[in-house]
Image (tube, coloured by chain):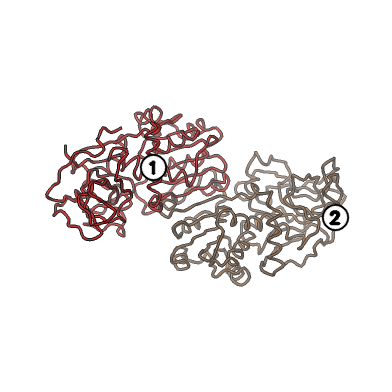
Chain colours: A red, B brown
Amino acid sequence: MAAHAVIPKYTIPGKNRRVVLGRRPDGVPLATDFDIVSDAVPVISDGQFLVRNLYLSADPVQRGWAANPAVMALGAPMRALSVGVVQESREATIKPGDLVYGFLGWQDFAAATRDDLLSHVPIPRAAASSYAGVLGMPGVTAWLALADLAPPGPDDTVLVSTSAGAVGSVVGQIARAQGSRVIGLTGSDEKVARCTSRYGYHAAFNYKSIDLPTVLAAAAPTGFSIYFDNTGGWIADHAIRAMAKHGRIIQCGTAATANWSPPPAGWRPEREILTRVLTWSGFYIFDHVARFGAAIDALSDLIDDGALAYDEDIEPGFDQITGALETLFAGTNSGKKLIFIGDA
Amino acid sequence: MAAHAVIPKYTIPGKNRRVVLGRRPDGVPLATDFDIVSDAVPVISDGQFLVRNLYLSADPVQRGWAANPAVMALGAPMRALSVGVVQESREATIKPGDLVYGFLGWQDFAAATRDDLLSHVPIPRAAASSYAGVLGMPGVTAWLALADLAPPGPDDTVLVSTSAGAVGSVVGQIARAQGSRVIGLTGSDEKVARCTSRYGYHAAFNYKSIDLPTVLAAAAPTGFSIYFDNTGGWIADHAIRAMAKHGRIIQCGTAATANWSPPPAGWRPEREILTRVLTWSGFYIFDHVARFGAAIDALSDLIDDGALAYDEDIEPGFDQITGALETLFAGTNSGKKLIFIGDA
């Protein structure tokens, strides 16, 4: 767990550094796709509040945002989920000193409204950074996707891809806590060890060094009843063919494929869906913003009970954020990827 | 609608002709994959009853049965759904003269048990043939799959592949009756006309003579909320990309692909499932045998009300059955494909 205090130390810069999209990325957004500009600290108007960001977050969903001209124009500040502290407020329910998490961008300051927030935390129960990870989009996604689409129980065998990631590590622990047998797939031996020693997986495998269909068949001889998929691609091709009858697949990410235009080819799944009588559902966390608070409460209870381990890969230095998505998709981070921009 | 009387005329042959699987089919089972043998009329034991089959059915699911050594050994009688009349019974609840439908095979006679039946009809409300079609597996599949996985309503735009088929024609009419806008895809201009004139489709298209993505985009500018898929393949590739957010796909058949080993390639769907937040579910009618009777009652009510049109392609002559699956997968039948083996 991060050693950062609930609210770390910070000063107030005189300028607002902002990361803008300089070029349309071809697949994973690279550091060279962004430019850093510096302008005046924003002035808030009625209904707004001024946030001093402390943690800038790198999340897989940003690849899609950066690729989509309808979401992000070239030259616009990078859409991103940041954690910060309110400095001034002209919004009745938000007070200076409150912790907030939401669409606050990759920048020092945001002039935000309530609609920009995913969570508003007057009294934090955990480190500020955790509200972007285990208590932020990744943790809440794990909680709500399982609850809505495939609540795990003692009869389930659950397969999780990117099992050591910010979402996967929480999925594994929730499923384990509900009595399921939980199997992880991840991309390094170090992460395999973390899955079994910290995140409660009964077994985990480095997909880069195994024969996947053989290992899946051995890990679940009667098939997986739940597959929580964060990768898609060839890992999913094999996972689908390792499902038990009436299994449920949650599509939460597609990290394995960088570019979707033109549509890449893979094994046709329709026969598997039919003959295994599967249900394959997409989960999009921003459909469920109204339930963020309840999920954060439930996850905070698990942390208080010592039942939920989490890791954060926090690097200091504003300039580091432009390369954070490259790191994320290369899988070289160890825990939720954040850039700290408070005081050193 | 078929002109056949509720129970057509039949005599009792002195021998039992049986169609056995002579060769493992490579894709669609051909007439040459079967042999016809002739043996003694079976003698029933306790718990059994003797059925004289009248209608032998050709259904897409038989392709999978014939391909699967765990379901059908070479030399075994073809697993098939037939309609017949009980001649003798040593089972307390089944009486001579009762109409029955179920796993009675491609043969003149079956020595059956209750477990072989999908429906038992002491007092038929419609022609005997209809219990293998609109009141049989195809019609009940349409009814239960919609009810379970995507109940259509006035806000839905529904796409149906093989829209003039034994399942599709019922799907279209149920969805139309519930107030949905219903669009069909089928393989000939004659079937297109039948979809709109008889089955209540608002529009239907011959997929062989259109630019599918252009036509789908024009037919549902805001996307389809339900796709009832009987084909899979490239039709499904495009249909998935024409879905509205939160759309539901029912996988009921895979008629477009004859051979699944090795896995054929197609466009990867996982990004569409994620970004459109789709739910894609397989439906397997034999999971729901206990609900056959209730679905037949509901469909019979629709027929009585004149609210459900159906067509049957009934050919006489036992020898015709071996080629019936070829006809079915070529799409040259017009209505539910049955072979009549009662009296000419």
User: Image check: B186 left or right of A284?
Assistant: right
Residue B108 visible in rendering: yes
Q: CA distance from mark 2 to mark 1?
A: 65 Å
Residues B144 and A343: in front is: A343
Residue B42 rendering spot, x and y as whole percentages:
84, 44
Is B221 situated above or below A168? below
Find disc 2 in the rendering and name its residue: B97
Q: Residue furthest bottom?
A: B197
Disc on res. A317 = none
Residue at screen point 47% across, 63% down: B212
Residue B253 rendering spot, x and y as whole percentages:
58, 53
Q: Chain of mark 1?
A: A
User: Nearer the viewer's eye, disc 2 or disc 1?
Assistant: 1
**In which quadrant of the rendered image does the C terminus of chain A lie?**
top left
Residue A99 rendering spot, x and y as whole percentages:
27, 45
Q: Residues within 10 Å of mark 1 (few under 14, many from 20)?
A: some
**In which quadrant of the rendered image does the N terminus of chain A lie?**
top left
User: Image check: A142 left or right of B332?
Assistant: left
Q: Residues within 10 Å of mark 2 (few under 14, many from 20)?
A: some
Q: Chain of mark 2?
A: B
User: Image check: A328 left or right of B155?
Assistant: left
Residue A329 visible in rendering: no
Is A133 situated above or below B10? above
Amino acid residing under circle 2: Gly
Find disc 1 in the rendering and name its residue: A297
Tell me whether the residue at label 2 lies in contact with that at label 1, contact meaning CB atoms closer than 8 angstroms.
Answer: no
Residue B283 rendering spot, x and y as whole percentages:
59, 50
Amino acid residing under circle 1: Asp
Q: Residue furthest left?
A: A14
Residues B311 and B106: in front is: B311
